[in-house]
Image (tube, rainbow, N blue to C red):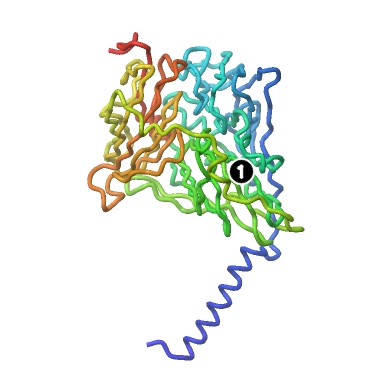
């Protein structure tokens, strides 16, 4: 039994601990702040064209005082963010000075998969190059996308080395005049594992191993804001393998974008789970003066998976005179342009897509097959909506992603989801994760295959680099009148 003297002593300790915990969040004490946050270099299209040359080569880099060598674009650990508009043309000349093949994928873009566009089957050999030309449709969704290496078998290694960067289309804030002139912060999240001054070779990267978390290549930079100030943060998870479960101490996220698609309403969140390759656009409005950490919470992908996280990504320093008239949040729903709910569409085809893996977690499958770039696994008819039930029979999470188009999540483990917009990535629960749901983890989506620009071959896969490199990817072909030319 606890005596009164002990109880009083513990109470004093609890009060003192509470004081210092609150104080560390609100005033930060005298601890030094990190370097000022820096947006990545941004390059915008001119007269409807963005033309740029990238040299992929091994170059020196530094993260958190640690020097290493890695594959980079133009010697930049955080390569430029490319800004284009609907109707523009993106011309990217990629020279490969690596000792391995490489290529580029324009993630989330609703563009043609035919060469010289977003053709992920292109393999650029060492000491050669390729000139990509990506025509962006006039009706292309506006928001955050990105580009990254996508060569089967070495995608994980090349992305962790540095071969991924930002791509933004249009102006997602255009419908909201009250947001004119607010500060926009572009945050690309990526981690770097180091082994003897280098990125570990393919097959040696372990998502559970110690790593270096960065935002645009920086370690815990500082964003300075006034009390009541509102900023627009576009956040992209462009790393190789990791989920980010984000929280900003003492604040909420007002989400208005997901995966390059404007939501149909403001979604207010205490935390945001970002699977590999996902992107979000959020409004952040500060409150009391102090220091507040943007943290990636500790994360466990399941009994067959990985454990990591627990890192501070950046610090918000709230200081100065309060904003006289803070912007009213959330944004009223009637200001959002309408978004089509694909779950209400008549679907032409229903498919079952099964993610699985071997017991040792070294080989991964879709519908029992390892990836073969020469085999077309699925053919779709241009003009159709299709309902796919994606199941996960393994003991770890997977991230479903499909190229060229978007989908709406209708249900997760049998629970209908509120309709808030489209996306191109979704977390797929592992088997047994939900004690109230029997059988494999399940996500039901409706995919839009109506845009004629998707004609050709592309892929769908788990976007955890380790998983796709070891088999969890499949080829689909879209054509006007199946059977498609390469489908067998």
Q: Residue furthest front?
A: 334
Q: Position of residue 468 (x, y in %)?
A: 39, 31
Q: Residue furthest left?
A: 438
Q: Residue at x 56, y 73 (%)?
A: 18
- Disc 1 residue crowd, few under 14, some 14–19, many 20+, Cα 10 Å: some
Of residues 161 and 41, the one nearer the viewer is 41
Q: Residue at x 36, y 34 (%)?
A: 343
Quarter of the image where the N terminus is located: bottom left
Numbered marks: total = 1
The image quadrant that residue 408 belongs to is: top left
Of residues 371 and 285, the one nearer the viewer is 285
- Label 1 element class: strand
Q: Residue furthest top?
A: 485
Quarter of the image where the C terminus is located: top left
Q: Is residue 397 above or below residue 226?
A: above
The image quadrant that residue 381 belongs to is: top left
Q: Is residue 488 left or right of residue 292?
A: left
Q: Residue at x 69, y 43 (%)?
A: 182
Q: Position of residue 33 (x, y in %)?
A: 69, 55
Q: Is residue 434 above or below residue 191?
A: below
Q: Which residue is mark 1?
A: 233
Q: Position of residue 415 (x, y in %)?
A: 32, 46
Examine the rendering and report whether any part of residue 163 can be seen. Answer: no
The image quadrant that residue 189 belongs to is: top right
Examine the rendering and report whether any part of residue 391 can be seen. Answer: yes
Q: Residue furthest bottom?
A: 4
Of residues 411 and 99, the one nearer the viewer is 411
Q: Position of residue 193 (x, y in %)?
A: 52, 41
């Amino acid at each position: 039994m606890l005596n009164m003297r002990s109880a009083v002593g513990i109470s004093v300790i609890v009060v003192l601990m509470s004081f210092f915990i609150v104080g560390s969040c609100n005033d930060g004490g005298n601890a030094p702040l990190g370097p000022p946050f820096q947006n990545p270099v941004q390059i915008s299209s001119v007269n409807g064209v963005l033309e740029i040359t990238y040299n992929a080569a091994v170059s020196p880099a530094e993260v958190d005082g640690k020097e290493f060598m890695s594959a980079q674009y133009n010697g930049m650990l955080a390569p430029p963010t490319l800004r284009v508009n609907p109707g523009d043309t993106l011309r990217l000349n990629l020279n490969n000075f690596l000792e391995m093949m490489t290529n580029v994928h324009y993630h989330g873009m609703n563009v043609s998969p035919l060469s010289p566009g977003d053709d992920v089957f292109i393999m650029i050999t060492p000491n050669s190059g390729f000139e990509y030309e990506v025509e962006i449709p006039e009706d292309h969704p506006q928001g955050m996308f990105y580009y990254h290496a996508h060569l089967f078998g070495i995608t994980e290694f090349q992305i962790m080395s540095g071969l991924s960067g930002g791509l933004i289309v249009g102006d997602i804030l255009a419908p909201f005049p009250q947001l004119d002139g607010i500060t926009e912060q572009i945050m690309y999240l990526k981690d770097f594992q180091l082994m003897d001054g280098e990125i570990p070779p393919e097959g040696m990267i372990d998502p559970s191993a110690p790593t270096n978390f960065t935002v645009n290549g920086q370690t815990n930079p500082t964003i300075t804001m006034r009390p009541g100030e509102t900023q627009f943060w576009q956040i992209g998870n462009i790393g190789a393998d990791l989920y980010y479960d984000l929280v900003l101490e003492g604040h909420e996220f007002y989400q208005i974008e997901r995966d390059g698609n404007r939501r149909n309403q403001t979604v207010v969140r205490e935390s945001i789970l970002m699977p590999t390759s996902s992107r979000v656009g959020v409004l952040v409005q500060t409150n009391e003066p102090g220091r507040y950490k943007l943290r990636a919470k500790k994360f466990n992908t399941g009994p067959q998976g990985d454990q990591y996280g627990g890192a501070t990504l950046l610090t918000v320093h709230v200081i100065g005179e309060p904003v006289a008239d803070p912007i009213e949040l959330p944004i009223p729903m009637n200001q959002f342009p309408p978004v089509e709910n694909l779950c209400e569409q008549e679907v032409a085809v229903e498919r079952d897509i099964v993610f699985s893996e071997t017991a040792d977690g070294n080989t991964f499958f879709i519908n029992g097959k390892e990836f073969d770039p020469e085999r077309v696994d699925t053919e779709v008819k241009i003009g159709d909506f299709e309902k796919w039930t994606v199941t996960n029979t393994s003991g770890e999470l997977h991230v479903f992603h499909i190229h060229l188009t978007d989908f709406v999540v209708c249900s997760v483990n049998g629970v209908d989801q509120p309709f808030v917009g489209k996306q191109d990535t979704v977390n797929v629960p592992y088997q047994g994760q939900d004690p109230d749901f029997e059988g494999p983890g399940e996500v039901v989506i409706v995919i839009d295959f109506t845009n004629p620009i998707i004609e050709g071959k592309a892929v769908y896969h788990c976007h955890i680099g380790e998983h796709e490199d070891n088999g969890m990817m499949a080829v689909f072909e879209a054509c006007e009148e199946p059977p498609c030319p390469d489908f067998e």
